[in-house]
Amino acid sequence: MSRKTVVIGGGITGLSAAYYLQKAGVDTELVEKTERLGGKVRTFHKDGFTIERGPDSFLARKTSMLELAEEIGMGQEVVKNSTGNAYILAKGRLNRMPQGSHMGIPTRKRPLLKSTLFSGRGKVRALLEPGKRVKETTGDEALGLFLRRRLGNEVVENAVEPLLSGIYAGDIDRLSMDATFPQFREITEEYGSLVKGLKDTGTAPPVRKKKNREKPSAFRSFAGGLSGFIDALQDALKPGSVQLSKGVDHIEKKEHGYHILMSDGEVKQADDIILAVPAPAAAKMLAHYDWTEPLKQMKATSVANVAMAFDKSAIKQDIDGTGFVVSRTTDDYRITACTWTHKKWAHAAPEGKALLRCYIGKPGDEEVVDKTDEEIRDIVMKDLKKIMDITDQPDFFVVTRWHNAMPQYSVGHKERLNQVTNHMKRDLPGVQLAGAHYYGIGLPDCIDQGKEAAGRIIESE
């Protein structure tokens, strides 16, 4: 009798896992508690605009999403982002990110010295890093503490923190080094310097020559938006193998396999289960095991974004770039970042139109996410008036809230996760965790986790 696998969760992780399982001939069913697939991937179309309400792109250097796109017939739809200067709002102005920076870490002397982001003292502190003898700690620690030790507070607060917080929507002085950027420690141990290691390994981008100023495009999307990829992935699954609006209450281990108690009273049987759901949801399904406590403690922050459509004439202060992030030393603004989407993606706006997407919600200001759509719009417009002299109201705007949606890999994350997975191997063989709450938050990271979980089941067949 063939084995049956149930994938719980219809985000990109669960969809990818189901695809690779079915491709290998494994009897697989996917259940999703909401009425749609894709998780935080959600594309909205209006009046010729293509608006991403969740992520807007994926990293090209992480190849799993490109490879899967080719497999499901989406390869021809892949588009590159347009490039331009990146800015950081600090000291009351938009400052260009120094060329040659990696994740905000300045690696080249001349661009650092020319930068308006840092004081003379801050620049000297950063320049001393390659020769600075620092006693490193052992074991996991906060990413922010590591970087402050190497580069000083000013570079971290004005350049590194705005970028990394934009990725993780959290406090870098609480984020786990081992779970986010373990390569920083590895590079430092090998080269004796983070800056030197980033340059020597080719991790940091080179400073561009004037005759070739265009940056290579690091990101990709799809011509019709990311939801097109989700639709194609769903279409690649076997008809009838996906069930929507099917929540899971409980998972019980039986003598042979598992019973999955659905919210509507149905009981499904499975030999293998992939839990492609957030950590608190997984803990609830396995609530009768006390070792799930670390899953309950995995926090997630709430954020929101507002996409606003304008006529290009409304953008009086046009800037050569694709957006900016906001230093949290700047108390006068509540937005955390703004993408000039019409400049980043050619397909995002009709000719003569502009599309801006601004982000709000950060540690200490999460309540802003629960304000009304109009209040959020007004907060954002107040900031944009100060920053870019935009006074016209948008033709339309779209607010998207993501409550408890941005997982926080706090210090000790990997150790806690290892403890949980070791218990699962012992008590629940054949049950696996996968998704953004566990081993990486980017879209390719989630695909990798789904593929790896599927691979373990295929190998055990």
Image (tube, rainbow, N blue to C red):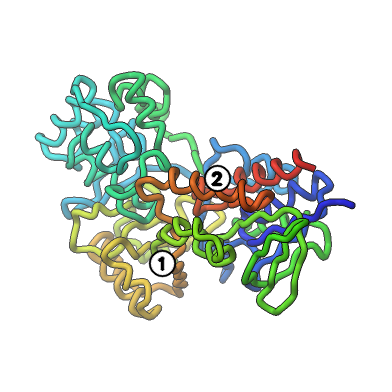
Tag 1: amino acid:
Ala
- Tell me the crowding category of disc 2: few under 14, some 14 to 19, or many 20 or more residues within 10 angstroms, Cα based: few
Element on which disc 1 rests:
strand
Inter-mark Cα distance, 1 to 2:
35 Å
Q: Nearer the viewer, residue 405 or 196?
A: 405
In-image side of 156 versus 370 (left or right): left
Q: Position of residue 218 (x, y in %)?
A: 49, 39
- Tell me the crowding category of disc 1: few under 14, some 14 to 19, or many 20 or more residues within 10 angstroms, Cα based: many
Closer to the N terminus: mark 1 or mark 2? 1
Q: Nearer the viewer, residue 245 or 320?
A: 245
**Does residue 328 appear in the picture of this structure?**
yes
Q: Which residue is mark 1?
A: 304
Q: Which residue is mark 2?
A: 422
- The picture quadrant where one finds residue 385 is bottom left
Tag 2: amino acid:
Asn
Q: Is residue 207 above or below residue 283?
A: above
Q: Position of residue 272 (x, y in %)?
A: 72, 53
The mark closer to the camera, 1 or 2, is: 2
- The picture quadrant where one finds residue 373 is bottom left
Residue drawn where x is 29% and y is 61% of the image: 363
